[in-house]
Amino acid sequence: MSRPVATVHAVALVGLDPRPVRVEAVCTQGLPTTRLIGLPDSAVREAADRVRTGAVRSGASWPKDKLVVNLAPADLPKVGTGFDLAIACAVLAASGQIPDEALDGLWAVGEVGLDGTVRAVPGVLPAAAGARQHGARTLLVPDAAGPEAALVEGLRVVPVSDLAEVVAVLLEQAPARRSVAVPPVETIVVDDLRDVRGQAVARRAVELAAAGGHHLLLAGPPGCGKTMLARRLHGLLPELEVDQALEVAAVHSLAGERRPDEPLSLTPPMREPHHTVSAAGLIGGGTGIPRPGELALANHGVLLLDELLETPRWVLDALRQPLERGEVVITRSRATVRYPASVLLVAATNPCPCGHLGSPTRSCTCRPDRIERYRARLSGPLLDRLDVQVELRPVDRDRLVGPADGEDTATVAARVRNARARAADRWGPGRLTRDVPSEPVRATVVAPALRALASAIDHLGLSARGFDRCLRVARTVADLDDSEVVRTEHVDEAVAYRLPDVVAVP
Amino acid sequence: MSASLEDPLARLAGPTVDPRRLAGVLAWLVDPARSIAGLRRAVPTTDGGGMEAVAAGIDAVVRPPEAHIAPVIAALVEVWLGLGVRVATIGDSAYPDRLRAGWPHLDAPPLLAWRGQPPTTGPTVAIVGARRATGYGTGVAAWLASAVADAGARVLSGGAVGIDAAAHLAALEAPGGTTVVLGCGHAVRYPRPHAGPGGLFERILDHGGSLISEQLPHAPASPYNVRARNRIVAALADVVVVVEGGARSGALVTATEAAERGTTVLAVPGDVRAPGSVAPHRLLADGAGPCTSPADLLEVLGAPPAVDGPRRPDELDPDAQDGPSGVTVLPRDVHAELAAAWPRPVPIDELADRTGRAAPALLGALTRARVAGETADDASGVRLRRAPR
C-alpha cells in the first residue's frame, strides 16, 4: 500500500511577483531513488542531495522506496535554494515521519544545509506576503529571516533553526516559536539643508523637486555641491507609508541588499550608482529571472545619477520608459518581470568634459566642439523629462567659512509635507504631481497664467513639449504657496527652471 | 540636360538663375576629381569684366551633366528642395555683387545656397568672435548686434556658439535682421544645439533671417570648410568687428580677409589678462580701430549714430534706473544691479544675494523680464538686453 501524496507550499518569485508552488512528495515502490521534477534549475535539483543529507544528519530517516518530488505548476521555472525546506517537510510527511495534518496550511521557505541547518534566502519578505495572499496560515522560515517575514501581518511566522526543530514543531513535541517584527525606525536626518551656503536657486529647486516629485537636473562644475544638494533632497522627502516601506523592503530583500533582521525602514531609499553602471545594472536583468536594478531599488526614493553625461547614451535612453511609467518591465527568455520604480531622478552633470567651464578659478581645457557634443548628449527626450533644471556655480570661499545662511531641513520639509498633502487631496492618496496627466493640472490653472506660459514658451525659444512640464512644476509652486489655483506668478517661477534650449558656451 | 532634371533645377534656382549653368556647376562639383577651388582656377580671369563675363567664363568650362551624373545631381537637388534651399551661381543676378567682386583672386564661391531671405546687399555688419566667449564678450556682442540691427543694418556672423550666437540672437527681432554663413552644407546639423528643431537657426528663419552656405548639402563642418566660410563673412560685410578670440581664432581669418578686401575692421578691447582678448588686441596693434559702442559701427556704415554709448556710471541718475521706455517690469533694485554690471551678465544666485530677495519671487520677476524682452539669458547669468540709461 502506498502512502498518499504529501503537499507543502512554497513560493517562487518571478521578480517581485510571488507565485504559489505546491511541493508534492510521494513514496512508491521501486528502486530507492529520488526524482525531482517540475522545471527545477540546477540549484533546485541539488536540493535533493542537501535535504537528504541534512535530514539524515538531523536524525530523520530517508525513505528506502522510490521517492518522487514534484514542484507544481510544472511549467513555472523554479530558481534558487528556497524550496529546500518545503521539499524536506513534504518528504518527511510522505515517509510518515510527521502526520499529514501538520501540513495543513503550511508554507515553508528556506535553504537546508548538509548538517540540517535551515539557512536564510533572499526575498523572504515578498515570499511571506505572497504566502499570506494565497491563504497560508503558518510559514516556516529560517531563524534569521523571522523578523523580516513577520513584517507581513495576518500570518503565523515560525522561525526554525534546523530540520530537527522542524520535525519537533510539526510533531508538536516542542513549542513553535513565533517571530515578531522589529518596530519601524524613524528617519534620522543627517544631511541638513542648513549646511548648504548660498545657492538660493538650487535650494528652491530641491524643495520643488521634493514637493512634486519632479526629476531634477543639476549642472555645474565639480565642487559646487551637486551631490550635497541631492543628499539634502533625500532628507526633505517625507517618511514612507508602511505599505510603501514594505514594497521597498521586498525589493531590497530580493536583491539581497537587506539584512533580514533589519527593522523596517521608513526612510525613502537613495541610490547612487556609479556612472559606469550598465543598462542591466540600472534597469535590472541577469539570466533566468531578471533581478531588480538600481531603478527598482530606488523605488519611492531618490536615484542620483552623477556625471550623467559620462554614462553611455543607450544606458540613459533605457531610463525613459521606466521614468514615464513608474515601473520597470524586463522581458527575458524565462519570464517577464515588473518591478515598481517610482523614483525621483536627480541627474548631476558637469558643464563640460573637464568640468571647469564657467569656473571663476579654474580654466576649462575643452575644445568648444567637444563641449557642444557633450551638451548635445543631454538634449532630447531625457532632458525633457527633467522638469526642474538648474545651473550651479561654485560658492566663493568667504561664503563657505561664513555662518549658515539658509533655512534648515526641518523648516523646508514641513512645507514639502504640506504641499504633498495638498497634492494628495487633489489627485488621490500618494500621487505626486509629477505623475498626474496634463488635463487635470491644466484645470487648476487660471486663464491668464496659461496665456503667460504660452507667451513665455514662444518668446524664450523653449520647446512646446515643455508646456505641460512647466505647468506641473507651476502646480507644485502653487502647492508650496498654499494656493488652490495656479496663478501667473507661479508659472513665471516654473519657467525659470528650464534651461534654454539654445545654450551659449561661456 | 535630361528633361527629368530640368524642372527640379528650375524650382531650386528661381527665375533669375540659369538652370543650365547651375546644372553644369553642380556636375563639376559632384565630380570627385574636382572641387570649388578647382572651378575657380579653371575659369579664365575676367578682371574688370561684369556679371556676363563671369557667366561666360563658367559656361566655357562646365559641361552639362553626363547621364551617369544626372541622378546624383537629381538627388542633391531633392535634398536642397526638401530643406527649402534656393541656389544661385556666380554668374547670376541673384548672387550678391560684393561677393563676386572678389572673383577670382579672393575666392568667391561659384555657387551660393541659402535658406530664408536671399542674401541682401544692404548695409551689413559682421560681428565675429570666439566660441568660448565670456559673459563680457557675449554681452558686448549682443549690445552691438541689437543696436545695429535696430538701426536697420543686417548682422552677419558664422552661426557658431558663443559670440556668433549672441549676435544672431540679439538681432533676431530687430528690423535689420540677421544672416548666418554656415561652414557646412544645409543638410548637416552643425552646430548641434543651433541646428536642431527649435534651435537658433529655426528661430532665425522664423524671424526672416537667412542661412547661407557655399557647400553641397552634405558637406561636413570640417575645419577647412569652417575656416573657408570666414572669407564669405568678410566679403559680405561693410564692416567687421571682432569681439573676442584666442591667438588662433577664426575671427582673425575673417579680419584678415576683410582687410585684404579693404573692408574696415574694428576690434572690441577686452580684459588684458583674458585669453579671449588676444585676437582683438593683436588687431588693435595691427591698426584696426577700436569699437567701444555701436556708434563706431554705424559711423563706418555712414548712418547717423542713432544709438548712444553707455553712460559712465557716475553719469547714471540714481532715480532713473528704468529702461529706455521709462518702464521696467523688474523690481528697481534688481534692475539697478543688472544695470551696474551691464553688459556683463549677473549670476542669479548673486542677484539674490545682493538684493536680498527670495529665489521664488526673483525667478518669477526675471521670467517676466525675459518675456518682455528686457533681459537675456547668458550661460553665466542674466543681463539687460539694452544699454541702461
Image: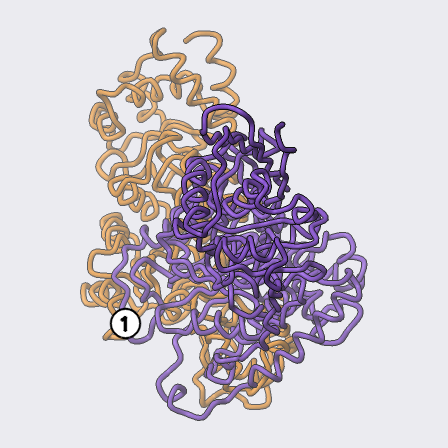
Chain colours: A purple, B orange
Q: Is residue A502 visible to the viewer in this orientation of the structure?
A: no
Residue at the farthest bottom position: A403
Residue at the farthest front position: A1
- B76 or B297: nearer the eye? B76
Q: Residue at x 34, y 21 (%)?
A: B25
Q: Is residue B97 visible to the viewer in this orientation of the structure?
A: yes
- B316 or A498: nearer the eye? A498
Q: Quarter of the image holding residue A362? A: bottom left
The chain to which mark 1 is attached is: A
Q: Is residue A349 above or below residue A132?
A: below
Measured as percent of width and height from the top left, residue A495 is found at 62, 64
Measured as percent of width and height from the top left, residue A168 is found at 56, 57
The quadrant of the rendering that contains the N terminus of chain B is top left
Q: Quarter of the image holding residue A93? A: top right
Q: Residue at x 53, y 70 (%)?
A: A234
Q: Is residue B324 above or below residue A3?
A: below
Measured as percent of width and height from the top left, residue A381 is found at 53, 47
Crowd rating for badge 1 (residues with CA inside 10 Å; few <14, some 14–19, many 20+): few
Q: Is residue A211 above or below residue B68?
A: below
Q: Which amino acid type corresponds to the residue marked 1 in the rendered image?
A: Arg
Q: Is residue A253 above or below residue B291?
A: above
- A388 or B287: nearer the eye? A388
Measured as percent of width and height from the top left, residue A416 is found at 65, 74
Q: How many marks?
A: 1
Judged from the image, the secondary structure of the residue bearing numbered disc 1 is loop
Q: Residue at x 50, y 23 (%)?
A: A30
- Residue receiving disc 1: A362
